[in-house]
Image (cartoon, helix red, strand yellow):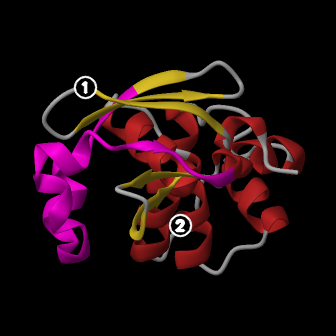
Amino acid sequence: MRPRQFTLTAAEPKGGSMLRLTYADGHRCDLDLAGVIERHPSLSRLRDPKVFATAKVGEQGASVLWANDDGLELAADNLRARAIEQAGGVSHEFVWNWMARHDLTLDTAAEALGVSRRMLAYYRSGAKPVPRTVALACLGWKEAQKAGAEPFALAA
């Protein structure tokens, strides 16, 4: 079963490259796809306002689809992550990427950040919003690693 936080119930074009997305958990957000369209030549057709206006929720709420073309489909979880980031928040993908870049398990990442394994799993899955303090701790941990220091070692 698809998580409610990644199941779309509505996708409404708002003009230009803006979409208003509504998710099954009640979250609503606006997303500007201009940058995504620019970076991915395969999405160039979305520059056409008539094509962009065809946006609709894909099968089982898993994506947004344009012009009934599978080549013009973007996943609901990625769209939510982009919208959160555009609004100044931290997405679940930030945690996933940080852990993958540093080859951290859920246990080692939770210990490094000083949070419980369960809470980190919630952040990583998108079930709970990632607090800015957790994102800052990820960045601080990375810098400590580069400097060869023991990250966040407490003085005895």
| SS for dot 1 | loop
The answer for how far apart the CA atoms under marks 1 and 2 are is: 30 Å
User: Would residue 132 be counted in the magenta stretch?
Assistant: no
Image height of 108 relative to 42, above or below: above
Q: How many marks?
A: 2
The amino acid beneath tag 2 is Asn
Question: Magenta span covers which residues?
Answer: 30-59
Mark 1: amino acid: Lys
Q: In the displayed structure, does residue 110 sit left or right of residue 71?
A: right
- Residue 88 in sight here: yes
Query: Is residue 45 or residue 21 the one in the foreground?
Result: 45
Across and down, in percent, residue 134 comes to 58, 41
Q: Which mark is residue 3?
A: none
Q: Is residue 140 left or right of residue 112?
A: left
Residue 50: name its quadrant: top left
Image vertical order of residue 151 relative to residue 129, above or below: below
At horizontal 39% and vertical 37% (from top left) the residue drawn is 83
Residue bearing mark 1: 14
Residue drawn at point x = 65 percent, y = 18 percent? 26
Q: Main SS of the magenta segment?
A: helix
Residue occupying image coordinates x 69% and y 43%? 123
In the rendered structure, find residue 97 and report the number of the disc placed on it: 2
36 vs 20, left or right, is left
Q: Are marks 1 and 2 in contact (CB under 8 Å)?
A: no
Q: Return the x and y of residue 59 as percentages of the image width and height.
A: 65, 53
Residue 136 in view of the camera: no
Q: Position of residue 122 (x, y in %)?
A: 78, 42
Compared with residue 109, is residue 132 higher up or lower down, i.e. above or below? above
